[in-house]
Image (spheres, rainbow, N blue to C red):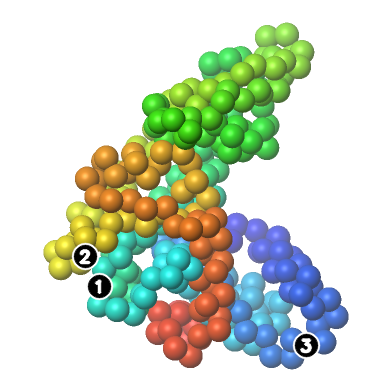
Amino acid sequence: MIADFQAAENMIEGFINMIDGRRRFFSHMKMVICIPSGITEVEKRAVFDSADHVDSKETYLIHEPMAAALGIGLDVEEPEGNMIIDIGGGTTEIAVIALSGIVCDQSIRIAGDEFTNDIVSYMKRQHNILIGERTAEQIKIHVGSALHELEGDLAPEDYAVNGRDLMTGIPKQIKVGYREIAHSLDKSISKIEDAVLKALESTPPELAADIFRRGLYLTGGGALLRGLDKRISLKTKLPVQVADDPLRAVVRGTGIALKNTDRFSFLIDRKSV
């Protein structure tokens, strides 16, 4: 969703210039842009307008869970249900997909950015140390966990964190372990679990049977959090699998949609908005 039009247009233009600096080859530019499933009609129009301003001749929108499903190799056109949990930066998208459509979905603004803020708040509250977002991101990568107990090789070593002591104002280093980070992320992960349960509750019985057999698919950067698949599995009593290279699942699926815009009926064009 676009909060700053100018920034969005500059970003899209920057990407285009990285491919074709002088715009020699893009006489007819076709674009596919992925959007959260909970987006409003006004927000969709804002995305189309931004694409128009960078000279896109054909613009299509695709919902992020659908792009993620394509990106991990699922056949979205078959009459069987698949549940995708895409934990991105700003939102977590949970959707049941069948017959080229999203049957039911939940979109919540709890995802990677919220995890980062949770870590910053925890370090301030528990250790009286102020850290930046980049440091919090590194903590999440090195010792981030959804479970308080990890088995064997999954358990990472403690991570040294540098920040500013809030009492003295002097730079300080402390070590944090994965159990502390699991504690700091607990509330946010619980909200994601609740959203998954809500989506399962509204799933039609026939598709619920497919999901019971196939399990849930985790994509997005948040899927890399240690033990998250096991935690969601314990909560739902269903098998959960993390997709291969979950970080790039959505962008791979968007690429597939771009190559097959004439085939996929779920792509949204300007006429349908």
Query: Marks 3 and 1: which is nearer the front?
Result: 1
Look at the numbered disc 1 and give the secondary structure of its residue. Answer: loop
Residue type pointed to by label 1 = Glu
One can see residue 204 in this view: no
Residue marked by disc 1: 80
Q: Quadrant of the N terminus?
A: bottom right
View extreme (left): residue: 205
Residue 267: name its quadrant: bottom left
Badge 1 vs badge 2, beta-carbon distance below 8 Å: yes
Horizontally, residue 41 falls left or right of residue 45, namely left
Circle 1 crowding by C-alpha within 10 Å: few under 14, some 14–19, many from 20: some
Gap in Å between the C-alphas at discs 3 and 1?
Answer: 40 Å
Front position in the image: 30 or 7: 30
Circle 2 crowding by C-alpha within 10 Å: few under 14, some 14–19, many from 20: some
Residue marked by disc 3: 25
Residue type pointed to by label 3 = Phe
Query: Marks 2 and 3: which is nearer the front?
Result: 2
Give the x, y percent position of residue 81.
26, 68
Q: Residue at point 67% right, 85% down?
A: 29
* Dot label at residue 252: none
Horizontally, residue 261 falls left or right of residue 196, namely right
Q: Residue at point 66% right, 82% down?
A: 56
View extreme (front): residue: 152
* Dot label at residue 210: 2
